[in-house]
Image: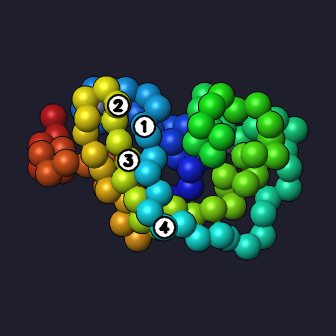
Amino acid sequence: MKRRLLDLLACPSCLSFPLELIVEREEEEGGLPNVPDKPICEKWCAFTQSKPEDPDDCVKCMGLEVVMGTLLCRGCGSKFSVEGGVPRMLRAEDLSSKD
Ligand SMILES: [Zn+2]
Ligand SMILES: [Zn+2]
């Protein structure tokens, strides 16, 4: 997953935003995108841990793939693991019950 995703994800339990990312392993991806006119992240850039201001920073956060880590909610303490680059945001009950 990209750090960019933290600009889009809220805690599924309590809707806290942003989630905290603890990176265990990340890989650099080749071919950085061109520097855009404005930051790619809108509300929260997990690369700088602040409000997005510099488009340069977002190019860096787009160029890194988080392979292993943990997403932590400061609101309710929920933890979600990132495995193989995929955040496991859904709990078992979310998968079985749809109304
Ligand atoms: Zn960013
Ligand atoms: Zn939460």
- Label 2 beta carbon less than 8 Å to ligand 2: yes
Label 1 amino acid? Leu
Q: Earlier in the sequence, mark 2 or mark 4?
A: 4
Q: Mark 3 points at which residue?
A: 71
Contact (Cβ within 8 Å) of mark 3 with mark 2: no
Please say if 24 is above or below 52. Answer: below
Q: First in sequence: mark 4 or mark 3?
A: 4
Image x and y of residue 26, in percent = 54, 66
For the residue labelled by badge 2, is the local secondary structure a helix, a strand or a loop? loop
Mark nearer the N terminus (4 vs 1): 1
What residue is drawn where x is 37% and y is 26%? 16
Question: What is the three-letter code of the residue carrying label 4?
Answer: Arg
Q: Is mark 1 within 8 Å of ligand 2?
A: yes
As measured in the structure, the alpha-carbon distance from the residue carrying label 3 to the one carrying label 2 is 10 Å
Q: Which residue lies under the disc numbered 1? A: 19
Amino acid on which the number 2 mark rests in the picture: Arg
Left or right, 23 with respect to 11, comes to right
Give the residue at mark 2.
74
Residue holding disc 4: 25
Q: Residue 11's quadrant in the figure?
A: top left
C-alpha separation, residue under disc 4 versus residue under disc 1:
18 Å
Q: Residue at x 15, y 34 (%)?
A: 99
Residue 30 appears in view? yes
Q: Distance between the residues labelled 2 and 4?
A: 21 Å
Q: In this view, does 44 lie above or below 46?
A: above
Mark 1 or 2, nearer chain start: 1
